[in-house]
Each structure stands twice: as C-alpha cells, then as structure tokens.
Image (tube, coloured by chain):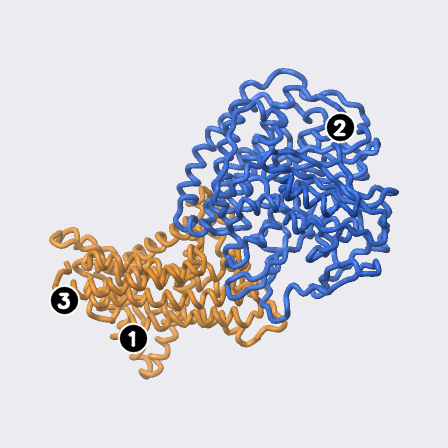
Chain colours: A blue, B orange
Amino acid sequence: MNTTFIPLNEFRSQMETLRRDKGMDFLRDMIGMDWGEDGLGVIYLLENSATKENISVATRTTDRVAPAIPTVSDLWKIANIYEREVFDFFGIIFNGHPNLRRLFLRNDWVGYPLRKDYDESEAVNPVRMYSENNQNDCTYTLAEDGTIKQIPDTLFDNNEYVINIGPQHPATHGVLRFRLSLEGEFINKVDIHCGYIHRGIEKISEKYPYPQILALTDRLDYLSAHQNRHALCMCIEKAMGLEVTERTQYIRTIMDELQRIDSHLLFISCAAMDLGALTTFIYGFRDREKLLDIMEEVTGGRLIQNYNVIGGVQADITPGFAEKVKTFCKDILNKLNEYNDVFTNNIITRKRMLGIGVLSTEDVISYGCTGGTGRASGWSCDVRKRHPYALYDKVDFKEIIYNNGDCYDRFLVRIDEIKESVRIIEQLIDSIPEGEYKVKTKPIIRIPEGSYHAAVEGSRGEFGVFIESKGDKSPYRIKFRPMGLPLIASMETMLKGNKIADLMAIGATLDYVIPDIDR
Amino acid sequence: MYDFSIITTAIDQFLRSLMPSGLAIFIECVLVGACVLVAYIVLAIIMIFMERKVCAAFQCRLGPMRVGFWGTLQVFSDVFKMIIKEIIDLKRTDNMLYNLAPFLVVLSSVLTFSCLPFAKGMEVLDFNVGLFFLMATSSFGVLGIMLAGWSSNNKYSMIGAMRSGAQMVSYELSIGISMLTLVVLSGTLQLSEIVSRQSDAWFIVKGHIPAFIAFVIYLIAGNAETNRGPFDLPEAESELTAGYHTEYSGMGFGFFYVAEFMNLFIVSGIASTIFLGGWMPLHILGLDGFNAAMDYIPGVVWFLGKTFFVIWLLMWIRWTFPRLRIDQVITLEWKYLVPIGIVNLLIMTLCVVMGWTL
C-alpha cells in the first residue's frame, strides 16, 4: 500500500481539494500511527464512491508533547468519531474538532496506550473501582502557548431531562450507553458512550505473533467471525505473497456466506424482539440453530469458530457438509416467507419502520455506513462488488439496493441478502474442487516491512485490516476497521426529533455489534 | 339450570339459626371474602400457566416441562420464589406511596373481580348499577400504576407511568362506549339481568353488526387497558426495561404481575358476560332438546369456558403483534376507536328503537 505523506502546513488545503475536487467522499478508515522518531500522525484511507478509486494519505507531526493536526471532521462526518478514537489512543489534538474527548477509555485515564512510549504499569492506571463522573466530561483544545487545555463539557445542562439508555439495557444489544435528553417522549440530544467492553485488541495484537492474533478477530464482531478472520488472513497472505488453494477459496466463500445468513437471521430476530414481536424472535433463533449445528460440525465452534488460518482453513469440511448446507438453503427460503407473513408485512411493523430514521445517500457515504445500512440508502458499497476477493468475481449475485434509507428498507435489505447468500452458496456447494485445504507455512510467520490493507464484506459492512510491519513476527501496528462505529455515529442525525421507541427501531435495524465497536 | 343461590340461602339460614343476624352477616362477609381471594389466586395461577403454555405453543416451544408433570408445578414454585424474595427498600423513594401502589392495583383488580357473575346466583354484589360499579372500580387501578412510577424515583418508571396514564385513561373511554352500546341493547345495568336476558340468544348474536363492532372495539381497548401486547408500552421491556415496576422486587412486583393477569381475566370475563352470555348456556331458538341438554352443563363451566376462550384470543394477539408506539396508541384510540364507537352506539340505538334486533 502506497501512502502519500502531506506536510502538516498543506494538509488542510490538500484534504479539502481531495474531498471537494477529487470526489473522495468516503473516508474508509483513519489510522493513528506512532512512527517513533518520525513522530505521531494519522493515515487516511479515502475512496471515491463513484469511481471506486482508492488512495491513502498521511500526515504527521514530530511534536510528542502536544501533537496537533487540523481536523477534517467538517469534511467527512465520520471523522468526528474517528478523531476522538485517535485522540484517545495517541493523544493527537485535532484543531477545530467540535467535541474532542476520549471515546473508549475513561476520562481519568493516564497516558495514550497505543503510543510506543506508553507506560503500562499498573501504578499509573490502577483498576478504578468508582464510576466516572458525567460532569467531568470535557473536551480538549490546544491553547495558544502549546499546552493542552481542558474545557468542561456543556453537552447537557442541568434542567434537561437526561436519561441513560444502557450500558445494561435490552435494546442496546450489549454494553453501549446512550445519554438522551428528552422532551416528553421526544429525543432532543444524543450522546453516545462506548468503551464498556474495550479490550484493547489492537494493543494486544502488537505483542502477539500473527497466528495468535487470528484468535482475537473472532471476538470483534462475533456475528461475522469468519469474515473478520478471512480479512486478517487475506491481509497476511497478501503481505507474505502466499497463494491459497482453490479449495480453500471455495470453503472460505461458502463459510462467509453461511456466517452472513447466520448474522442476518439474528438481525431479523432481534429487530423483531426490539419491536416487541417475541414470536418472530424465537422463529429466527430456531432456524439459526440449524445453521449453527452445521457450523459446529465443520469448525467445532458455534460462536467463536477459529476456522480460517494463514494459508487455508483449520480443518477440512466434513463429508456430509454439502448435503446439509443444501437442505438448509432450501429450508431457509421457506422460512423467510414465514417471517414475512408474521412480521415484515404486519401493519404495526410497517407503521413502526416506514419513514423512521431516514439516512440520505450523502449521509451514509459521509458517515461511511457500509453494509446493509448503506445499501438501504442507495449506496452501492458492497466490498464483494467494489473490490472482489476470494470467489466473489466468479459467482453471480445481485447487490441489494434500496433507496428510501429508512428502517423498513434496512430490514428488507437483510431479508433479500439472505436470498442472495443462498444463491451464492448454491452456485459453489456442488463444485468444491479437490485439493489441499491448507498450504504449508513456516512455523514462525514474518511479514516483510511495509504497510498492508485488506477488506472484506462483513455481515454489517466493510471490515478492513491494516497492518504496518517492521519485518517482525508481530505487527508494528494493526488496525481493524470497525463496522459498527460509523453506524452508531450516524444515529445522532437519525434520532433527533424522534421518539424513544424509534431509538429501538433505529438501533435494531442498524444492526451494530458492540464488541466490534469497542474492540 | 342450577341455581347457586339455593346453597347460599341454605348457609345463610343455617347461620341465622345459630346466632344473631348481625354476626351471621359478618361471618358471611368473611367467608365470601376468603372465597373471592382463593378464587382470585387460583385463577391467577391457572392464567400464568396458560400464558406460558399458549405462548410456547405459538413459538413452537414446549414451555415449562420440568417441574411436575407437564410443568404443572412450575407456577407454584415461581409463586413460592416470589414470596420468599427480599423486598428491597430503596433510598430516595417516596416510601409510603411506593409501598401503597401495588396494593391499590391489586385492590382495584380484586374489587372488580368480585363483581363478576360466575353462575346463576353466584355473585357477590347484584344491584341495579352493577356494570357501572364494575367500571368505576376497574378504573382506579391506573392510580396505583401512576403512583408506582412516580414514587420509584426512576426515570424509566416515570416514563412508563406517564405512558400508562395516557393510555389507560384514553382506552377507558372506548371500553365505556362499547359497554354502553350493549347496555342500550340490554336495557339494564344489572349484571344478573344482563345475563338472563341472553337466554334466547347471546347479545353478540342479538345485536348482530353493531354488537360485533362493539365486541372488537372492546377487545382492542381491553387489551390496552390491561397493558398487554401490542399495547404493553408502560412496561415495554426493550425500551423501558420493566416500566413502572422496574424498582419493585418480591411480592411488590408479584402484585403487579398477578394484577395484570387478573385484569386480563376480568376484561375477558366482562366480555363473556355482556357479549357472549356469561353463564348462560348456548341456546338455539327452536331446538328444545338441544337447549335442555345444554342446561345440564353448569353455569360456572360456561362462564369459565367463554372467558378462557376470550383470554386465548387476547393471548393470540399478544404473541403475534409487535408493539405500537405511544403516539400510534393514542392515535388509534382518539382518531379511530372513539369515533367508530360513538357512531356504533348511534346505530345500536337506532336498531333497538326500530326493533331491528334479533
């Protein structure tokens, strides 16, 4: 991957040119970096959503005490939250950012963990047994004299009716916390708190050898475990120049699609449950169970499957696999009609979803909401079509696009995507070629120096892996592009003026998974 | 027809022969109270078990199966667990109101329950404004719910209570109008009279189209009145965790839970009384042999059978539909059900005046 470095003084104007004149409207990812001697900086992965042209640019500053880079949060809406993440981990101040504060870590955290000179000792950051105080929320700016200044947060004032949805709440599907300012049933303001299950996977990865990192990817978005691992394996294989066998490609593609069906079935169930239709919830889980049984037989796991490895897959598929998958595929198409009868076409469902939480095409691109959410708003953002990998350029499938961008369209996209996944599987399942399922690799895997990037279509959007290697057996810096972070970032636009009940409909149809957001 | 009043009169005469009449009446009151409470609890347990089994059947599951044969003892163990659970005292709550609220809810529900005519002669109160009294007692349950939400000092509870206030007060209106429609048809408010006037045909048949419309409105409004899905917004678990009873534990919660189920029974019981003939057996005009055979089935069986049929209908709705949003709930009531109900009342009046009833 070739990265163009832009000097700090030209950075802002060049980014504006890229955004406005070159049409680089999709900020795929923003990677904070600590280059050691060369300073701290950020790599921006940009894409032109019309021509699918990709570039990566970077900028850096050698000031380690108060590093400052101009913000781009006014050019790409998602940069707002990405910059908070970079600030959290690297302490880079983004000048002009409207609300710069930590995203994942506590406000009283000392130091910036992904910097190479970070002090990990427990004396600095002991386990704090008290809860952080909301009132201490603050934003940071760079004062005239070069010091970092804290400004107390004025997000909510004292006479607003502020209610916490989460961190323990049935509708957040995990430990996510929304602070809502309510006006009766209407939502005035939203503030999103992440980081309740932040495990520092990127930091841990810098110490693990490559094969061990693989185990962590399943724990990001557990509903796209296969795709996540596929992306990481692909990135490492690309870096090593390793060619996997055709059989591996078949197995990987089929497993990715099975995983997508699994995830979408869970999506349908949980969306139904959030809207109060408990019967559909049980139906979805009943059918997902059959799929999990198939997966368990092949991989040995039901949720955390650890199937892909560098150079192939962990174990060969079982003899009855093809038959079982075919039966399941036939079965699930009938079951989809059942869901449609009992839930999708229900008048209450339609009333709850139609026209609620609309995201325009410009918004989804600017927020980088890929996956079903992006496609429901009319953005053709499927990585399988944009940058085909594995066998996706050989199979025939349709990218599902809807144009209204409301909750109902987001729901329909997933239903139709199950059908497309079934089509892909049916094209491949009968023609899995004979051969090795795994190519031999050296016991210790090293990646040549350089930076590498690979992306796959996860169950809920683009999942990207960025590896910066110095030639060691563990990466210098690894960054996973979260699929969910853009989704929850976009909630702010959708929620304003809607009701509490709409938060559940919107949250359910965005289909975020918290471990993937928090990493 | 069995007449239960033979038994009650016999007991009454027996007691009066032994003691002064004041004491006899006192003992009778205690006996009746005990009977009502026992029936209340037994029916609540049956209903909870039924809900779990019906829900399981709709969801292709088995439901409770482990405790006792076919899971029959599950509910008893649940109740036992609920009773031995600690009742947690919360800081910064309005303690008196907080503890009072569940009792208000249960009180309202028991009072209403005791008005139901279970069989001929088997009713606690039978006076000329029975239906009116029943509506009055059922409507102060909302007070308990509002107090629970307010005194818990919890924002979720507060929102739940406000929702339920808006919802229950609104739907009270539709229930009233649909009952009124049937009162126009029956010409009386006395519950025993209402039932006995259905001896030739049930009111839903007698009143044909307007009665059927009133029945549907009553079912929708009754479902909303009992805070059950798709109208379970006051306790929407995916939005407000548990709504107004979030902060309650042990029997505090148990009272709300039982009252909710018994309100469902009451709503269905009223529906079966005023629409489906109550304890009156199925009589078809002209088939005397059939009618005589039907009369051998006791009135309690008829009443409970019809009531549980309506309960089953409501459970079917509960486990099929997604939840409405608060503005949709209020819109449904004020823009659709109330106008339809009022027009329906006019049609019914017209039918009765013109003699177009069966």
**Where, quadrant-wise, is the N terminus of chain A in this rendering?**
top right
Pinpoint residue A440: horizontal percent, then vertical percent: 75, 20
Q: Residue at x 55, y 76 (%)?
A: B96
Chain of the residue that carries numbered disc 1 in the rendered image: B
Residue B353: mark: 3
Chain of the residue that carries numbered disc 2 in the rendered image:
A
Q: Nearer the viewer, mark 3 or mark 1?
A: 3
Whether A10 is drawn above or below A392: the answer is below
User: Is residue A509 depicted above or below B146 in this figure?
Assistant: above
Q: How far from the left and from the top, in percent, is residue B328?
A: 41, 58
The residue drawn where x is 50% and y is 25% is A326
Residue located beneath label 2 in the image: A239
Labels 3 and 2 positioned on one and the same chain: no
Disc 1 marks a residue whose amino acid type is Asp
Q: CA distance from mark 2 to mark 1?
A: 96 Å
- Using the rendered image of the protein, determine whether residue A194 is visible from the camera's viewpoint: yes
Determine whether B348 is above or below A218 in the image.
below
Asked if disc 3 and disc 1 are in contact, CB closer than 8 Å, the reply is no
Q: Which of the labelled discs sits on residue B12, or is there none?
A: 1
At horizontal 63% and vertical 65% (from top left) the residue drawn is A156
Dots 3 and 1 on the same chain? yes
